[in-house]
Each structure stands twice: as C-alpha cells, then as structure tokens.
Amino acid sequence: MGEEAAAAPTVAAAAATASGAPPHLLLICFPGQGHVNPMLRLVKRIAAKGLLVTFSSVSTFGVKLAASTGVSASGDGVALGRGRVRIEFLDDEDPGPDLDDLMRHLAKEGLPAFAKLLA
C-alpha cells in the first residue's frame, strides 16, 4: 500500500506532462446529503494530489447548495493542494421531492444531461 501511495503523484505528474494538462476526473454524486459530504471530502483529497476534479450532481441540488453555502459553479475551479476543484451541475429539471420521482427522473433525464455536461 505504501508503494501505491508514493506512486500516485508520479502517475499524475506523468499524465500532466504527456498532455500538457493535469488529469481530469468527473465525479457525479447522488443528490442526498449523506452522499454529498463524503463525496466532497473525496474530491478534495484527490484534487490535492494534483488532478483537476469536477464534482457534479443534479441542478436542483446545485441551487440548494449555492443557497446554503454560497458555493456555485466555478469555471476554472478553485486551487486545492496541487490540483483544482470545479463544481458543475447537470442541466436538468426539478424532479420533485419524492424519491421515486427522483429515481424516474434520473433514469429518463440522467444520460442526456450527462452527455451535455461532457460536451
């Protein structure tokens, strides 16, 4: 395990020099508070190693997050350690408060919203 941890920055540095940009990781999170907080901690740890990490969830969660914390989508991201963290939200509509509605919404709208985010 110690060897893997020591090799991780070297891999990130090698990928960055090969393409001229740091590796970019996209993490999409289920919009529940019990999912978001641990995912954000993971995002910060990965970015600190030298990667560009984009955190994403549904846009309705993004509105709630921005209202409660003042955090909003950030173009180039925020520097963190040797990397950067960006926040982008899927372009979708409000699925409503019911979990079943959310799951149907994600099944129907998730893939097109994901494709738009990648583009």
Image (cartoon, grey):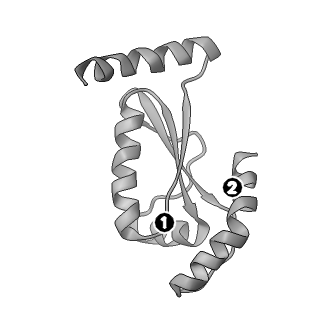
Q: Return the residue nearer the eye: 98 or 72.
A: 98
Look at label 1 and name its amino acid. Ala
Quadrant of the rendered image containing residue 95: bottom right
* Residue hosting label 1: 66
* Residue under the image location 44 percent in, 63 percent down: 70
* Residue under the image location 47 percent in, 21 percent down: 12
- Structural distance between the alpha carbons of marks 1 and 2: 20 Å
The earlier-in-sequence mark between 1 and 2 is 1
Quadrant of the rendered image containing residue 103: bottom right
Give the number of callouts: 2
Give coordinates of residue 93: x percent, y percent.
69, 75
Query: Which label belongs to residue 114?
Result: 2
Look at label 2 and name its amino acid. Phe
Residue 96: in sight, yes or no? Answer: yes
Q: Return the residue nearer the eye: 111 or 21.
A: 111
Q: Residues within 10 Å of mark 2 (few under 14, many from 20)?
A: some
- Tell me: residue 113, above or below residue 51: below
Q: Return the residue nearer the eye: 98 or 45.
A: 98
> Do labels 1 and 2 touch, CB within 8 Å?
no
